[in-house]
Image (spheres, rainbow, N blue to C red):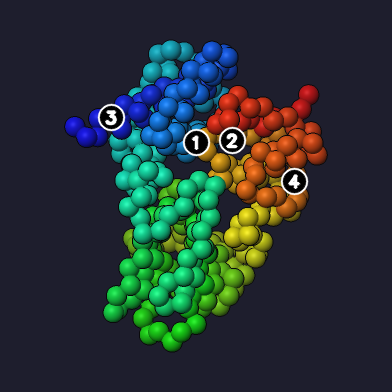
Amino acid sequence: MAAAPDREVFEAAASWYVQFQSEPPTAAQRKAWQHWVDSSPAHLAAWNQMEKMQRHLNGLPRDLARRALSSTQQRRQVLKLLLVLAGTGYLGWNVQQHTSLGNVWADYRTRVGQRRKIELADGSQIHLNTGTAINVLFDGEQRLIRLREGEILVRTGKLADPRPFFVETREGRVQALGTRFSVRQLSGSSRIGVLEDRVSIQPSGRPEHAGLLVAGESADFDNQGVGAIHPFRSTETAWINGQLIVLDAPLAEVIRELSRYRSGVLHCDERAADIRVSGTFRLDSTDAVLANLQASLPVSVDYFTRYWVSVKKAG
C-alpha cells in the first residue's frame, strides 16, 4: 500500500508531460501545472523524472514522437507505456534509488545544482557533482565507493594503504591504479576519464573483458565490455570549480550539460541544435548562462515556467 501514492504522483507528472508534449500549454494550464509542482517536493521529484524521459524520447525520430502524441488515444497509450517503464525501473522511477528524495539513504549526496567535496579516512578526496549519491564501504580487504547516481572526481590518498581502491557503478568496477580520475553514471553505461596515472575497468557481465585507461584517456563501458577510447582533457572536470568549459561544441550538447544543474526541463529545439558554441559558463547561475547565449547567438530562450525552458533558433 505504501507504494500507491508514489505511483499516483508519477502518473500525474506523466499526464502533465504527455499533455504538454502534444500541444503548447495555455496560460491557465501552465499556472495549474506550476501550482501542482510547487505544492509538494514529491511532485517536483516526479517532474524531474520526466526530464530523463524526455532524453529517451529525443532519441526517437522526430516525426515518430510527434505521431505518438497526435491523438487522445495515442497519448493514453504513451502514458501507459511510461507507467510500465516506470514499474520496470527503465526510467529510474524508484524513490529509494534514483531521486533526490531517495538519496537521503546514501552516505554522501548532492541535490540538483549542488556540488560537494569530502575527504575520507585514508586521505582520498571525492568531489560530488550535481545530483550525485555515493556509499562508502571500507573494510580490511578493500576501499569501495559505490556510485549510485551522478558523477564523481576521485583523488586517491597519498598514504600507504595496501587495500585496493574501487569505484563500483551499475555496469562494473573501476580500480584505481593511480591518483586522479572521474566516474559518471549514465543510462545503461558508465563513463571514465583519467587525469593522472591509470585505472582498470572490469565489466560486471564479462570480467574477462577488462580494459585499461591511462592519463588523458576516456571511455564508456557497459556490463559487457569497454567502448572506444577518446581523449580526456582537464577542462571536462571544470565542474569542480563551478564551470562548464566548451570549445566549438554543438548547442544541443551545451544545453544538455546545463540541464543537469537545474530542476525541470531545459530543451534545445532541433533547428538550433547544431549551432557551435565556445566559452566558459558558470554552473551556479544557469539562467544567466541562458541569457548570455541568447545575447550572443541567434537563439531565443522561452520560459513557459521556471521549470520548463526551451531554447529555439531565432527568427
Q: Earlier in the sequence, mark 4 or mark 1?
A: 1
Please tell me which residue is depicted at 43% across the width and 18% down the height of the picture: 75
Q: CA distance from mark 2 to mark 4?
A: 17 Å
Which residue is the site of mark 4? 277
Which residue is the site of mark 1? 51
Q: CA distance from mark 3 to mark 2?
A: 27 Å
Which residue is the site of mark 3? 5
Residue 220 appears in the picture as rendered: no
Task: Identify residue type, mark 1.
Answer: Glu
Mark 3 lies on a secondary structure that is helix
Task: Choose top left, top right, bottom left or bottom right for residue 108.
Answer: bottom left
- Mark whose residue sits in front, 3 or 2: 3
Q: CA distance from mark 4 to mark 1?
A: 23 Å
* 18 or 307: nearer the viewer: 307
Above/below status of 131 relative to 36: below
Task: Identify residue type, mark 3.
Answer: Pro
For residue 225, side relative to residue 20 (left or right) = left
- Mark whose residue sits in front, 3 or 1: 3
Horizontal and vertical percent position of residue 248? 75, 50
Task: Choose top left, top right, bottom left or bottom right for residue 45.
Answer: top left
Which residue is the site of mark 2? 266
- Mark whose residue sits in front, 3 or 4: 3
Q: Are marks 2 and 1 in contact (CB under 8 Å)?
A: yes
Quarter occupied by the N terminus:
top left
Dot 4 crowding, Cα within 10 Å, few <14, some 14–19, many 20+: some
Please tell me which residue is depicted at 47% across the width and 22% down the height of the picture: 35
Q: Earlier in the sequence, mark 3 or mark 2?
A: 3
- Mark whose residue sits in front, 2 or 4: 2
Q: Residue furthest left?
A: 1
Mark 2 lies on a secondary structure that is strand
